[in-house]
């Protein structure tokens, strides 16, 4: 087994025993990137020298008995989390040369625990999309099958972990962007409860929905990452002052006494039969581990796409107003008036999907339409939240598909935005309700594409997801990640 194939837990144990150094591990990932990233295209920026420097420091800290919790572990970071001194593009031309003067709280927490930040990875522009194809700097490929999308918007995160270019990654999830690419690339992705993880330094897309979370090759590794990134941050007023449990205590065998709800609306028309079979099989696995299976209903599921695609663009249209060519980012230098400069900077800097969202959001918030669209959507959002509250009266977690299909071919849906929006139907509701959601590999289709299973829990019940996910992982023993690139 190559060093880069190790899980975080394995690598930490080896380094603690003196069988592996952080420099060797980091070199192994950097070599891997050299070898395959021209095919995978996960990385926008690779910080070779910086990573090796951090690895050297990690080795000396370990020798001095001062190793942090992720000492020497090479990680990739979605390119919308601020990294001090390292370019952060958000996948957009408008931020092509932006170098943040500060670290996002999650990044500084990783650094404090001596993780090695190896580089920044590709994503849909401003996290708007489901395939990473709207990235202005190279579209990541699915490591499982040539010509297929890696998913999005954290496609670079999932592809880099699945292709063994790093041990884990941080992504962000506004409507499924951690869980969906994790599912399509056969790795584990966890979107924590809204407020569990600080959003300070996460470039805002839709502030009431955005959340940062880990993408890893095992459930245990997700727990290790969660222990480091979770918790209150005075720099993010929406982060919650609530004690952080030791998540590594959660992955335990057996599910006696756990009630697993199967939401009937998540198995409706449009669900691919192979995906359905994989999820149904996972239900049986959980049952075999002692869980009680209950039938539940989330009756407002059919409104989720409409509600999300009003609320998310509305918030985005406001958040993206800051890219005006004045403070930072791209500026058109030929305009001869201020208004012209605003117009040309934004028209030239943003891609088509981002412009579409700004237009939808501006329309939905405009006077005369606000009540009919934005206010109505907010009211229905409460009904969706209530669905979850009611469901969690009769079960501890929900099991469902992550996406209606496995990965599709690159370019397939690029001129049909509505078809892509519809594919988010199963992940969006967790963000609208603020509950945690996780994707765990459930199986592989006949065509050789991985399919994830989604687990959702009540607010701040990440532990039950990690426990159920671990049980699935143990039983299914799927290869997580893909070493042999097609
Ligand atoms: N696919 C969804 C969108 O395009 C979700 C994106 C996300 O979670 N960042 O908005």
Image (spheres, grey):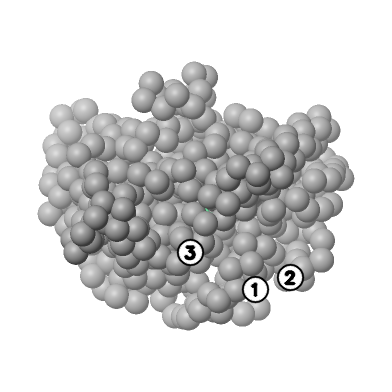
What secondary structure is marked by label 2?
Answer: loop
Quadrant containing the N terminus is bottom left
The residue that label 3 is drawn on is 353
The residue that label 1 is drawn on is 445
Residue positioned most to the front: 337
Contact flag, marks 1 and 2 (Cβ < 8 Å): no
Q: What residue is drawn where x is 55% and y is 76%?
A: 415
The residue that label 2 is drawn on is 272
Q: State yes or no: Cβ of the residue under disc 3 lies below 8 Å from any atom of ligand 1.
A: yes
What secondary structure is marked by label 3?
Answer: helix
Q: What residue is drawn where x is 34% and y is 38%?
A: 201
Q: What residue is drawn where x is 24% and y is 44%?
A: 327
Coordinates of residue 190 in the picture (x, y in percent): 53, 45
Q: Nearer the viewer, residue 14 or 418?
A: 418
Mark 1–mark 2 Cα distance, whole angstroms, equals: 10 Å
What secondary structure is marked by label 1?
Answer: loop
Coordinates of residue 289 in the picture (x, y in percent): 74, 44
């Amino acid at each position: 087994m190559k060093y880069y194939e190790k899980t975080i837990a394995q690598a930490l144990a080896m380094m603690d025993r003196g069988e592996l150094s952080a420099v060797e591990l980091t070199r192994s990932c950097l070599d891997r990137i050299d070898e395959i990233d021209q095919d995978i295209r996960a990385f926008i920026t690779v910080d070779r020298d910086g990573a090796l420097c951090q690895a050297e420091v990690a080795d000396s800290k370990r020798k001095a008995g001062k190793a942090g919790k992720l000492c020497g572990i090479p990680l990739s970071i979605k390119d919308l989390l601020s990294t001090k001194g390292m370019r952060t593009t958000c996948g957009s031309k408008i931020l092509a040369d932006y170098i943040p003067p500060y670290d996002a709280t999650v990044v500084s927490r990783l650094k404090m625990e001596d993780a090695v930040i190896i580089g920044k990875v590709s994503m849909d522009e401003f996290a708007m999309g489901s395939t990473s194809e709207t990235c202005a700097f190279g579209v990541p490929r699915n490591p499982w099958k040539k010509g297929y999308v890696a998913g999005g918007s954290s496609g670079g995160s999932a592809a880099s972990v699945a292709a063994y270019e790093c041990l884990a990654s941080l992504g962000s999830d506004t409507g499924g962007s951690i869980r969906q690419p994790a599912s399509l690339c056969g790795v584990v992705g966890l979107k924590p409860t809204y407020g569990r993880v600080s959003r300070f330094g996460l470039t805002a897309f839709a502030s009431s929905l955005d959340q940062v979370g880990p993408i890893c090759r095992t459930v245990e590794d997700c727990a290790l990452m969660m222990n480091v990134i979770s918790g209150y941050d005075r720099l993010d007023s929406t982060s919650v002052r609530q004690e952080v449990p030791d998540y590594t205590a959660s992955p335990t065998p057996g599910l006696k006494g756990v009630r697993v709800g199967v939401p009937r609306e998540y198995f409706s028309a449009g669900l691919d039969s192979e995906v359905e079979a994989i999820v149904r099989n996972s239900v049986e696995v959980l049952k075999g581990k002692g869980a009680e299976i209950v039938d539940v209903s989330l009756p407002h599921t059919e409104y989720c796409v409409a509600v999300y695609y009003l609320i998310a663009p509305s918030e985005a249209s406001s958040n993206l107003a800051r890219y005006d060519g004045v403070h930072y980012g791209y500026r058109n230098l030929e305009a001869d008036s201020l208004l012209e400069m605003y117009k040309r900077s934004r028209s030239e800097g943003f891609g088509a999907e981002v412009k579409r969202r700004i237009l939808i959001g501006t329309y939905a918030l405009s006077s005369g339409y606000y009540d009919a669209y934005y206010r109505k959507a907010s009211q229905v959002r409460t009904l969706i939240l209530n669905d979850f509250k009611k469901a969690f009266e009769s079960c501890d977690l929900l099991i469902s598909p992550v996406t209606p299909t496995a990965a599709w071919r690159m370019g397939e849906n690029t001129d049909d935005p509505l078809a892509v929006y519809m594919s988010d139907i199963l992940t969006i509701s967790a963000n609208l309700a603020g509950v945690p959601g996780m994707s765990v590999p459930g199986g592989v289709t006949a065509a050789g594409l991985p399919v994830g299973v989604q687990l959702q829990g009540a607010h701040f019940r990440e532990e039950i997801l990690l426990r159920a996910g671990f049980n699935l992982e143990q039983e299914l023993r799927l290869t997580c990640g893909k070493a042999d690139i097609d």
